[in-house]
Each structure stands twice: as structure tokens, then as C-alpha cells.
Amino acid sequence: VQLQASGGGLVQAGGSLRLSCAASGLIFSRNRMGWYRQAPGKQRDMVAHITSDYSTMYADSVKGRFTISRDNAKNTVYLQMNSLKPEDTAVYYCYSYYGGRNYWGQGTLVTVSS
């Protein structure tokens, strides 16, 4: 299984970014897909996930600003991030989950300047 995250970068506060995570080696449509993030010196925290039936869940800190979506035809999960804040600065990791197995991508860095 490979999860390739992309789309990170440097953005000013109030700006937007869209992260993508392309998956291979798994039956994508069956998997719950999601994003975690880890800021320097902090633990890795859940950001959002989307289930195989398209139910979504968000961390309180990103509700109303971030939107997770998936395209099963492209084996890709997205995270649209709007109204970014400096506290959103972190390495963002995508993951997949199915049948008790978790897989992680390599992470993509998002830096939000004030």
C-alpha cells in the first residue's frame, strides 16, 4: 500500500490550500480515509476523515474551514483548507483504514504565515 500526499506549501493567513492523497495497492472504496497533522513538538492529531459511505468527521479546530472529500475513481482523498491560520502549520499525513489495518502517507508540510 502506498499513500502519496501532495499540495502542501507556504500560504498567508486567511489563504487556502488543497491537499491530495493518492492511494495504491488497496481497494480504495472500502477504506476510511483521513488526515492527521503534527505540529513541531506536538502529538499527531486527527484533522478529518471520510468513510466508505462518505460520512465525514472533523476536529473542532477545523470545522467550517476544512472539507474532506474523496474520488473513488481516482483513488484519491482531498482536504480543502480555507481560512488558514498560523496554528494550522503542521505536517499533514493521510491515512487509510480497513479491517484493523492502518497505512500512512509520508506527510506534506503546510506553513501558514501571519
Image (spheres, helix red, strand yellow):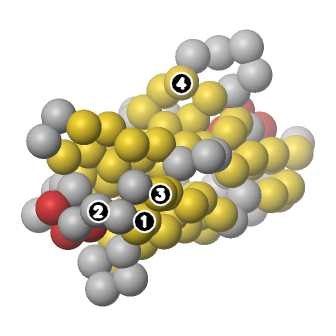
Q: Residue shown at 24%/52% (left/top)?
A: 32
Give the CA distance from mark 4 to mark 2: 24 Å
Query: In the rendered image, which quarter is residue 63 located in?
Result: top left
Badge 4: how crowded within 10 Å, few (<14), some, or many (20+)? some
Tell me if I can see residue 100 in this picture.
yes
Q: Residue shown at 17%/34% (left/top)?
A: 100
Give the CA distance from mark 1 to mark 4: 21 Å
The answer to whether the residue labelled 3 contacts the one labelled 2, judged by CB atoms less than 8 Å apart, is no
Residue type of the residue flagged with mark 1: Ala
Give the CA distance from mark 3 to mark 2: 8 Å
Residue type of the residue flagged with mark 2: Leu
Question: For the residue labelled by badge 3, is the local secondary structure a helix, a strand or a loop?
Answer: strand
The answer to whether the residue labelled 2 contacts the one labelled 1, judged by CB atoms less than 8 Å apart, is yes
The answer to whether the residue labelled 4 contacts the one labelled 2, judged by CB atoms less than 8 Å apart, is no
Of marks 1 and 4, the one in the foreground: 1
Vertical side of 36 occupied by 34: above or below: below
- What number is the disc on residue 2? 3
Give the CA distance from mark 2 to mark 1: 7 Å
Residue type of the residue flagged with mark 3: Gln
Tell me which numbered mark, 1 or 3, is placed earlier along the sequence.
3
Residue to which mark 2 is pinned:
26
- Please state if 27 lies on the left or on the right of 105 as rendered: left
Tell me which numbered mark, 4 or 3, is placed earlier along the sequence.
3
Tell me which numbered mark, 4 or 2, is placed earlier along the sequence.
2
Of marks 4 and 2, the one in the foreground: 2
Residue to which mark 4 is pinned:
44
Quadrant of the image for the N terminus?
bottom left
Residue type of the residue flagged with mark 4: Arg
Tell me if I can see residue 35 in this picture.
no
Badge 1: how crowded within 10 Å, few (<14), some, or many (20+)? many
Question: For the residue labelled by badge 4, is the local secondary structure a helix, a strand or a loop?
Answer: strand
Residue to which mark 1 is pinned:
23
